[in-house]
Image (tube, rainbow, N blue to C red):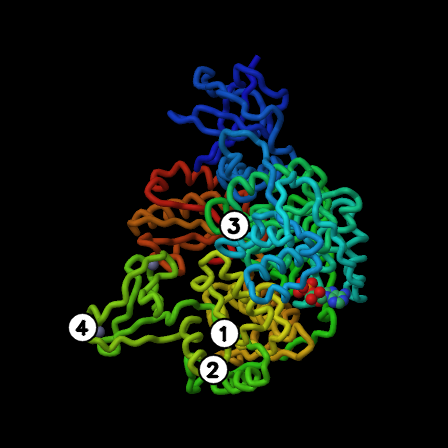
């Protein structure tokens, strides 16, 4: 009889599982999903048992080593999630060890007890509930703590308050001394939020969307909830979640970014009588482990998380929701390059639960699925409440005198709106002072030594920074080529806008929100609060400002440069531009006053831009889908990208040429291989980068090619001299 072996996924770049004999000591009857400690080369590593089977007859038995110990007395990863891992390994052609690793939080990927601890919570006392934050007007930090707890419905884990800034705990302790709050170390599995807020009465569109989705909730179903910004998608999510809570099931809510949308979490805490947990990269390993274990144990009813939360196990799966489903943050861009959206849909099907994809600007892939009837399609075309949609207008800036990139017309509207006491937002997706530093004498520009890119001038820091590799150096006094001191800048970033506008409007308070101004803990929250409550009248920011925020007094949005996306070489450029324009525009006129959106461009006749202005995102999407169909791009074809990089260009060429040969030898005529071509930025962080694009109309032949190709590439000698990766369904080319 052939001996039984355990097939173990081990974090390694090899596309295979490793066979071990069962351990000598005790082990569970069914070890699949258990962590095991195994010898691997000369090391000991922790892996995950993926299957149990018979030893490979070709393998000499003597080479099999036993598992050293089984770390779990019962499977830690449930079978349902093991299946998702298997699907991910097959679909993304990625090494199984690195895929299965994603099924566990970092703290559980090594030896150690799978046990959670108690959690510190802050709670409002009755006095705290009755106190209005304004009554603490002279103590702004106490005010912030009180407001946060009230927004959350009266209780929050300490961890969800850490963004209130350094020292907030001592502020809270002082408030506890005054009887406003108290702290409890408690079992997080006990619900604290009572969801006492009355349910909102849904408007007819919301009610129709809800009943459409509700009619199709036993078993798998995928629905696109397409609703313009401010149409009240969140209320529909809440109604759906209440329904599955009543059935004693769990809901998993995925969002692109939690730090940028703290309001959503608070809204959920206020509205739902549920045990709510968070899962995102701002949490430490212990906190993530605790959420994971509680989700796994069924002790949380609702989990709100970012991309990696798609791997949280749920024993009572009821519903998945992906908010802002079009957001590129759902795609992991290194290592295991998965799309959390696509995995979520697969998972929903595997576990027979419904899933809702929500967006004001759905990805073209998702729209096509909805139009072809594979997904349900519920629409919200009106803003909830009395808010009206903003008017979109184009400003042609060709041949115009600009001040810091701002046209006379935009400045004039700014003057008017600010004078009227309203809020305005200027959006520019470029941080720093200027993207180019140039010598006016000889034409030298400050380039990154390690990338094919210019360095960005940061004036306050007095530095030149590369936004691609992180390199930084001091601003030179004189041109390194000709020693002239006539250094100038070209183009503008948010730092420059802020300076120029501070000079123009010395009495208007402004706030700039980009990665440079929000590095300090608590800074982002403080700035967003200033923007929300109208304390800051002029808002300047990058795409951090485009997402999900409500600024009720905002009536003017200026897009300083819409051409970044429009002119990009990536076929997804226009889609990104349209999503951004629509999302940013959605920030205007959320309150009672009508909003206006001014878009500066040098390509006012661009057909897709015209369509967007005239017909909004749905019309844009129609036109863009037609273009994609004619060009044979996704979603009308399927892509994979083989990328390689190395310090020596020749190593990259050698590998990709060999890969091309292998691919062409096996590809059937339904698959097109193109390349090798240099990456859009050929040199980055000192490495040369190139790629091969693989395209097919159908998925099957694409995967038939990749299934043998990926392991074959692993065995190439030339592969050892490069870093290479396969990206299935890449979102940037
Ligand atoms: P979205 O997520 O679609 O952008 P939100 O769910 O944030 O929209 O809702 C936008 C605003 O409209 C919020 O202030 C919300 O409280 C309000 N709102 C939503 N639904 C209703 C409703 N049925 N009646 C009144 N106001 C509503
Ligand atoms: Zn010079
Ligand atoms: Zn660089």
* Residue 357 visible in this rendered orientation of the protein: no
Q: Residues within 10 Å of mark 4 (few under 14, many from 20)?
A: some
Of 163 and 99, nearer the camera is: 163
Foreground: disc 3 or disc 2: 2
Of 496 and 98, nearer the camera is: 496
Q: Give the answer, above or below, for where 30 lies relative to 168.
A: above
* Location of residue 188 in the rendering, given as x and y in whole percent from the top left corner: 65, 41
Q: Which residue is mark 3?
A: 282
Q: CA distance from mark 3 to mark 4?
A: 46 Å
Q: CA distance from mark 2 to mark 1?
A: 9 Å
Among the two numbered marks 3 and 2 on one chain, the one whose residue lies closer to the N terminus: 3
Among the two numbered marks 1 and 4 on one chain, the one whose residue lies closer to the N terminus: 4
Q: CA distance from mark 1 to mark 3?
A: 27 Å
Q: Residues within 10 Å of mark 3 (few under 14, many from 20)?
A: some
Q: Give the answer, above or below, for where 224 lies relative to 244.
A: below
Q: Are marks 1 and 3 in contact (CB under 8 Å)?
A: no
Of 480 and 89, nearer the camera is: 480
Q: CA distance from mark 1 to mark 4?
A: 38 Å
Which type of secondary structure does the marked residue at label 2 adopt? Answer: loop
**Residue 510 got which mark?**
1
Ligand 1 lies under 8 Å from the Cβ of mark 1? no
Among the two numbered marks 1 and 3 on one chain, the one whose residue lies closer to the N terminus: 3
Which type of secondary structure does the marked residue at label 3 adopt? Answer: loop
**Residue 393 got which mark?**
none
The quadrant the N terminus occupies is: top right
Q: Residue at x 63, y 62 (%)?
A: 362
Q: Which residue is mark 2?
A: 505
* Location of residue 718 in the rendering, given as x and y in whole percent from the top left corner: 34, 41
């Amino acid at each position: 009889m052939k001996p039984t072996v355990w097939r173990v996924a081990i974090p390694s770049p090899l596309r295979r599982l490793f066979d071990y004999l069962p351990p000598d000591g005790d082990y569970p009857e069914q070890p699949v999903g258990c962590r095991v400690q195994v010898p691997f080369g000369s090391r000991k590593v922790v892996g995950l048992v993926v299957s149990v089977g018979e030893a490979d007859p070709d393998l000499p038995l003597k080479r099999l080593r036993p598992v050293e110990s089984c770390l779990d007395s019962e499977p830690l990863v449930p079978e349902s999630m093991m299946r998702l891992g298997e699907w991910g390994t097959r679909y993304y052609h990625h090494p199984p060890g690195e895929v299965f690793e994603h099924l566990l939080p970092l703290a559980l990927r090594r030896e150690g007890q799978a046990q959670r601890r108690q959690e510190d919570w802050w709670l409002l006392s009755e006095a705290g509930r009755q106190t209005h934050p304004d009554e603490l007007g002279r103590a702004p930090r106490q005010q912030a703590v009180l407001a946060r707890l009230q927004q959350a419905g009266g209780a929050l884990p300490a961890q969800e308050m850490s963004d209130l800034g350094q020292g907030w705990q001592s502020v809270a302790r002082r408030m506890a001394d005054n009887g406003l709050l108290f702290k409890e170390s408690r079992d997080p599995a006990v619900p604290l939020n009572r969801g006492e807020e009355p349910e909102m009465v849904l408007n007819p569109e919301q009610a129709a969307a809800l009943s459409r989705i509700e009619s199709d909730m036993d078993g798998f179903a995928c629905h696109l909830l397409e609703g313009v910004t401010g149409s009240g998608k969140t209320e529909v999510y809440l109604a759906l979640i209440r329904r599955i809570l009543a059935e004693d099931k769990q809901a998993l809510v995925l969002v692109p970014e939690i730090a940028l949308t703290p309001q959503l979490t608070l809204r959920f805490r206020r509205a739902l009588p549920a045990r709510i947990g968070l899962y995102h990269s701002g949490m430490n390993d212990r906190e993530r482990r605790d959420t994971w274990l509680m989700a796994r144990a069924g002790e949380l009813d609702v989990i709100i998380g970012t991309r990696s939360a798609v791997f949280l196990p749920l024993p009572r799966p009821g519903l998945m929701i992906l908010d802002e489903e079009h957001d590129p943050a759902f795609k992991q861009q290194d290592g295991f390059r998965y799309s959390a959206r696509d995995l979520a849909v697969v998972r929903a099907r595997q576990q027979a639960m419904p899933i809702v994809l929500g967006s004001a600007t759905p990805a073209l892939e998702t729209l096509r699925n909805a139009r072809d009837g594979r997904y349900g399609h519920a629409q919200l075309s009106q803003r909830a409440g009395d808010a009206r949609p903003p008017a979109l207008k184009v400003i042609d800036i060709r041949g115009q005198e600009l001040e810091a990139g701002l046209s006379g017309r935009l400045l004039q509207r700014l003057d008017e709106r600010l004078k009227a006491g309203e809020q305005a937002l200027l959006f520019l997706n470029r941080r720093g002072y200027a993207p180019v530093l140039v010598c006016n004498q000889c034409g030298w520009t400050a380039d990154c030594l390690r990338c094919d890119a210019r360095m960005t001038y940061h004036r306050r820091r007095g530095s030149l920074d590369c936004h691609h590799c992180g390199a930084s150096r001091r601003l030179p006094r004189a041109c390194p080529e000709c020693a002239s001191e006539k250094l100038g800048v070209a183009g503008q970033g948010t730092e420059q806008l802020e300076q120029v506008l501070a000079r123009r409007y010395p009495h208007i308070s402004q706030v700039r929100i980009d990665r440079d101004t929000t590095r300090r803990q608590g800074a982002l929250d403080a700035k967003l609060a200033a923007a929300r409550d109208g304390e800051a009248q002029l808002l300047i920011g990058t795409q951090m400002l485009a997402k999900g925020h409500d600024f009720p007094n905002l009536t003017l949005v200026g897009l300083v440069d819409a051409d970044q996306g429009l002119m990009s070489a990536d076929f997804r450029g226009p889609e990104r531009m349209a999503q951004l324009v629509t999302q940013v525009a959605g920030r205007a006129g959320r309150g009672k006053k009508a909003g206006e959106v001014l878009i500066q461009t040098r390509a006012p006749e661009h057909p897709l831009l015209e369509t967007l202005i005239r017909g909004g995102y749905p019309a844009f999407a129609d036109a863009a889908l037609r273009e994609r169909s004619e060009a044979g791009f996704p979603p009308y074809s399927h892509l994979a990208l083989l990328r390689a990089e190395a310090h020596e260009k020749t190593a990259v060429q050698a590998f990709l040429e060999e890969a091309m040969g292998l691919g062409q030898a096996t590809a059937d005529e339904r698959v097109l291989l193109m390349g090798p071509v240099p990456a859009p930025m050929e040199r980055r962080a000192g490495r040369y980068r190139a790629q091969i694009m693989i395209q097919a109309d159908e998925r099957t032949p694409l995967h038939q090619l990749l299934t043998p190709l990926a392991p074959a590439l692993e065995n190439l000698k030339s592969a050892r001299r490069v870093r290479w990766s396969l990206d299935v369904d890449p979102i940037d080319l």
